[in-house]
Amino acid sequence: MTAARFRRQMPRALWLIAPVVIASVACLAGCEREQRQLHTPPPAASAASAVTMSSIQPVASAVTTSSTQPVAAAVSATVSNPYENNAYAVSQGKRLFRAYNCSGCHAQGSGDSGPALMDDKWIYGADPASVFTTIKQGRPNGMPAFGGHVSDDQIWQIVAYVRSMSGQLRSDIEPPRSDSLQAGKPEQRRPPEEPKRSSAPPAAEH
Amino acid sequence: MTARVVLPLSGAAAIATATATVQSAWAAPLQDALRPAGVQARTILDLLNLTVIVCTAVFAAVLIAFFWALWRAPRGTRETPADMSTEADSAVGPKAVAEPGLRRAVIVATIVSTVLLFGLIFADVLTDRALARLSMRDAVQIEVTAHQWWWEIRYNDPQASNVFITANEMHIPVGQPVLVTLKSSDVIHSFWVPNLHGKKDLIPGRTATIRFRADHAGEYRGQCAEFCGYEHALMSFLVIAETPDKYAAWLAHQRQDAPPPSNELQTRGEQIFLTHSCAMCHTVQGIGANAVLGPDLTHVASRQTLAAGTLPNTPGHLAGWIVDAQRIKPGTVMPPNPLAPDELHALLAYMATLR
């Protein structure tokens, strides 16, 4: 084959191959998004092992001792939640959010007797470890502790979902639709909020 | 040669051993559409028999015609080829000319096929009419909700205190029609008890009904018949048809609250049930555990199986299920529950009282 002929035929071959290559790469990229970790490891060795209790406890004790001055994100910024890269885990978190009646106080994220979760205000920190601590150990002014009732693994799923409510996750990971009727846009289509430290709710001041 | 014989034999022996092991652990009850236990399944079986007989007869007739044609075909060898000449170009005489009765045979076969097919359609319509005609006088009304991957079975009653919910085990009285309302909480499932009736899908957001009657007492296995996720295969249930007296006794028992714990160990088990994750999802009537995510456990010890027919209901299996259900049924919603040995012991002692 001469060089000229090769050059002539090359574009046509590219046109044929390029879509296949692009489609395959797109498929591969989607592979891990839905990957399901079916056997959740027992809590001791779970995803939560990234956060040891010793790294959480100082935060929690600090919070309980000074309720008006929330100190959440002090140590935990390094902790990442592996479920934040997994769409299945996030939608499990969404299911659990309703199943465990988080929605009883936080509604569908807009807040009711509990604070809103879909806005940019975070009283006790927006990073995964702070949200984990909030759920596991509770917070003053009404948030109960779910540690011991809900497994750490499920808490991490709920953490991933709670953060998806204000668009903290990658948008292709966030739930694109609801199983049941939901007012407003699905998590995936909400604009990402910039988390801001907020003061404790008014109830804390008196 | 010996290897060829021995291998299948050893394979068969292995299967036989495995079957024997499974059966000795827990003999699964009958699930067999060919042994109808109710009028609906009997009607469907009649239609099946008719269809099989007609189709077999037609298949046999086609085979006979085929072999007859082969036998009559002109034959030849390399030296003396068969005479394939037609009347027009043959001096010898017609050998492969058109069959004299061919046109008539084709017409007759077409008519017979049409008549038989319409006959089957007619039988099908009659069967459907018969299935729809089951009298619903004094019907028992049961509500079944399918979940991934278990069956919630609710016995409604005009008196609210008589309503109760059980799971994966449906008791019905023999000889009395049953009207089952079918719902789904997540994806499409299908309700199928071959000994009693055909399949009916459970579609989220819709309500379907299926009606049947058991004419013989016995235990019949049912299962989900529409792929519904990872553990679709482990989503079976039991229909237990029993005499009206026994059924009434079962109803009365299921309506009761869980008995209070009678010793220290059981009391501790009850506390563990309430303070650990059990009470987040499960109900036990009478102790204040009222969550409705998982199966109602008020009378769990009276059931034959755990986790929708996955395991026989023994303390050992229950312990394994509580500690790490994901190993047994990967994908199930039940999370692993690491309990200290004495806690697990107490919990099992308490759950054994939930008869």
Image (cartoon, coloured by chain):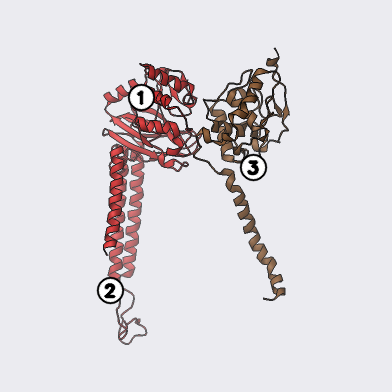
Chain colours: A brown, B red
Dividing the picture into quadrants, the one containing residue A163 is top right
Q: Marks 3 and 1: same chain? A: no
Look at mark 2 in the image and give the residue it sits on: B72
Look at mark 1 in the image and give the residue it sits on: B352
Mark 3 vs mark 2, foreground winner is 3
Residue B29 visible in the picture: no
- Under mark 1, the amino acid is Ala
Relative to residue B158, is residue A29 depicted above or below? below
Disc 1 packing (10 Å; few <14; some 14–19; many ≥20): some
- Under mark 2, the amino acid is Arg
Dividing the picture into quadrants, the one containing residue A118 is top right
x, y percent for residue B60: 28, 60
Residue B332 as seen in the image, left or right of residue B240: right
Q: Nearer the viewer, residue B2 or B103?
A: B2
Asked whether the residues under the numbered discs 1 and 2 touch, taking CB atoms below 8 Å apart as contact, a structural biologist would say no
Residue occupying image coordinates x 66% and y 21%: A63
Residue A151 visible in the picture: yes
Look at mark 3 in the image and give the residue it sits on: A172
Mark 1 vs mark 2, foreground winner is 1
| Direction top: furthest residue | A206
x, y percent for residue A100: 54, 26
Asked whether the residues under the numbered discs 3 and 1 touch, taking CB atoms below 8 Å apart as contact, a structural biologist would say no
